[in-house]
Amino acid sequence: MGDLLLKPLALLAELALLPACISAPPRVTFASQEGQTRADLRGVHAVSPEVCWASGSGGTFLRTVDGGTTWISGVVPGAEELDFRDVEALDADRAFLVSAGRPAQIWATGDGGESWELRVSIDLEGAFLDALEFDEDGKHGLAWGDPLQGHFLTLFTEDGGASWQRIGERLPTPLPGEAGFAASGTCLALRWPRIWIGTGGGAARILYSEDGGTSWEVAPTPIQQGEASRGIFSVAFLDDEHGVIVGGDYASPSTTHATAALSEDGGVTWRLARGRPSYRSCVAVLPLGKPSWLLAVGSEGADISTDAGALWTAIDLPGHAAIDFAPGPWLGGRAVGWGVAGGGTVTRVEVWP
């Protein structure tokens, strides 16, 4: 008789604890900002809730130092015909721009965009850079692109971008039709000395290095592949072991088949996510003090994951090409970032857990 009474009481006690264990859905707010340009924007880097850089077509760059209340836009002299698909900022004054297509170039500024210096220029048929990434201290950096002369075009710096060397011969040999996507400048992730690169087209593979690019391994993924419009468009790692890739087929953006996958062993193996989104061109870690939260964007909208990319849920956020969040969390425990898209679209995005 005593056991019969204790079981219902134990069940009631467990039910009383359930609300504390169930996480409320995250709250996402966004506001359009005037970027002072109509360029097609693909690159964005949030340095802080006040400082952000963006980049795009026509040699365009943007910068704000007041949270987006005012943006300053400009065109790099001598780069008017270039499409800057990625921007990597070290702070409010120092930033690098990467062009997609021939010539493949890297430009640098140290005075907030007042002046620019050409650091790399490769004017060869097939030259195409997709992404650039620096480590946290701004010393080591990697720029990566499509196959050139039989190797992936890969540039490495260990002096903060002052000089660059080509190291493409160290990477795995490209498969037929395999290349990269410069849709958001995020097909490359770096947690020094670890590096991960996502490919597409003829194959959707992860190229990864655990020793700063000296040696490389390769891992197959289940992401859509086999056509020039399919593959991995963005890579993000929450830590050294947990990673997420998103992509799909930009020619069929509403298709949800094989568009997101996750790894729990440093990128060695990958499995498809559940509740998969449609085509997504960028995935970003949400700095909320919760190491498993991510947000992905694409032309069809946006999705959020609170379990390291295993399950994705659609959220109310317009389509963007790229998004980035400042290291945080910030006042009120929120994540602060910006999304960019065509026509000079700039959107400030805030996420609360």
Image: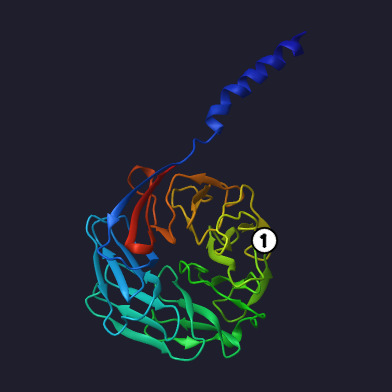
Where residue 350 appears, as percent x and y from the top left, is: 37, 48
Q: Is residue 22 visible?
A: yes
For the residue pair 132 and 56, the one nearer the viewer reads as 56
Rendered position, 274 above or below 258: above
Query: Looking at the image, what colour scheme do you see?
Result: rainbow
Quarter of the picture containing the N terminus is: top right
Say which residue appears at 23% left-offset and 55% top-offset.
69
Say which residue appears at 40% left-offset and 70% top-offset.
137
- Label 1: state its secondary structure: loop
Residue designated by label 1: 270
Where residue 218 appears, as percent x and y from the top left, is: 66, 73
Where residue 53 appears, as percent x and y from the top left, is: 32, 66
Q: Would residue 307 be found to the left or right of residue 340 on screen?
A: right
Say which residue appears at 44% left-offset and 54% top-offset.
319
Q: Residue 270, located in which quarter of the rendered image?
A: bottom right
Where residue 194 appears, as percent x and y from the top left, is: 55, 70
Rendered position, 59 above or below 326: below
Residue, far top? 1
Q: Is residue 46 visible?
A: no
Residue, far right? 1
Mark 1, Cα crowd under 10 Å, few <14 / some 14-19 / many 20+, is: many
Rendered position, 169 above or below 280: below
Q: Residue 157, located in which quarter of the rendered image?
A: bottom left
Quarter of the picture containing the C terminus is: top left
Say which residue appears at 66% left-offset and 72% top-offset.
203
